[in-house]
Image (cartoon, grey):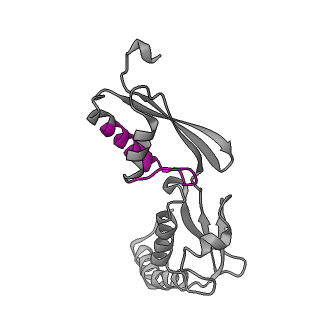
């Protein structure tokens, strides 16, 4: 399809005239419902308390982003798989949908493989450092990486500069995991196998 120059100008004029009205209509939408999807451990009410957006308010993208950030900052959710979106509702207003993916809770955390350093010594040291990782907390990979570095630093101070620290996870329930921290103070030491 080809437009003549006058037709193209008319089309552009109409687009420029009505685009602000169309955009204003979508921004002026009222929120008819808020749905929370994907939660297994936390209730809808618990998640709703983390957000400020309410039914009946005017749709506000900035506020939705703040609400999403509030949900993520709770430390309970996977940032890669938690999002907010909107869609038209049955009455033509907006439905806000928070799609969440909860981080599994740590059911148990076990230090394995220690031969030269006592488990109690290492646990005492780790209990005074940040982050503290323990049963009942959501699993956070960033915290686990820092935890690994704390263990390596402690072992290096004790003379085990080449120690290796690895994690293994296993599912306990649909919402919890067990973590085993495998520590080898002297990799390659045949007596350690």
Q: Is residue 42 above or below residue 9?
A: above
- Verify whether residue 89 appears in magenta: no
Nearest the viewer among 73 and 10 is 73
> Which residue reaches farthest right?
90
Q: Is residue 135 above or below residue 59?
A: above
Residue 26: x and y in percent read 54, 80
Q: Which residue is rendered at x = 44% and y = 85% of the image?
A: 17
Which quadrant of the figure has residue 46? bottom right
Q: Which residue is rendered at x = 38% and y = 15% of the image?
A: 189
Residue 100: x and y in percent read 59, 60
- Verify whether residue 144 appears in magenta: yes
Q: Which residue is rendered at x = 54% and y = 54% of the image?
A: 138
Q: Is residue 160 above or below residue 33?
A: above
Residue 136: x and y in percent read 58, 54
Nearest the viewer among 16 and 85 is 85
Q: Is residue 41 above or below residue 11?
A: above
Q: Which residue is rendered at x = 49% and y = 56% of the image?
A: 79
Which quadrant of the figure has residue 54? bottom right
Task: Give the total of numbered labels.
Answer: 0
Residue 104: x and y in percent read 59, 51
**Horizontal side of residue 86 vs 150, given as left or right:** right
> Which residue reaches farthest top?
190
Query: What residue range appears in magenta?
Result: 131-154
């Amino acid at each position: 399809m080809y437009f003549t120059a006058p037709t193209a100008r008319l089309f552009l004029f109409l687009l420029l005239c009505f685009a602000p009205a169309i955009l204003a209509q979508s921004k002026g939408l009222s929120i008819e419902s808020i749905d929370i999807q994907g939660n297994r451990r936390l209730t809808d009410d618990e998640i709703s308390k983390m957000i400020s957006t309410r039914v009946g308010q005017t749709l506000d993208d900035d506020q939705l982003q703040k609400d999403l950030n509030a949900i993520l900052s709770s430390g309970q959710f996977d940032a890669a798989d938690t999002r907010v979106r909107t869609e038209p509702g049955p009455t033509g207003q907006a439905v806000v949908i928070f799609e969440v993916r909860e981080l599994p809770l740590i059911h148990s955390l076990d230090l394995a493989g220690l031969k030269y350093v006592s488990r109690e010594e290492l646990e005492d040291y780790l209990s005074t450092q940040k982050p503290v990782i323990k049963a009942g907390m959501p699993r956070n990979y960033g915290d686990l990486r820092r935890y690994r570095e704390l263990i390596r630093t402690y072992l290096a101070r004790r003379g085990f500069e080449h120690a290796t620290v690895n994690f293994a996870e296993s599912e306990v329930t649909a919402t919890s995991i067990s973590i085993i921290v495998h520590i080898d103070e002297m990799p390659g030491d045949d007596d350690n196998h």
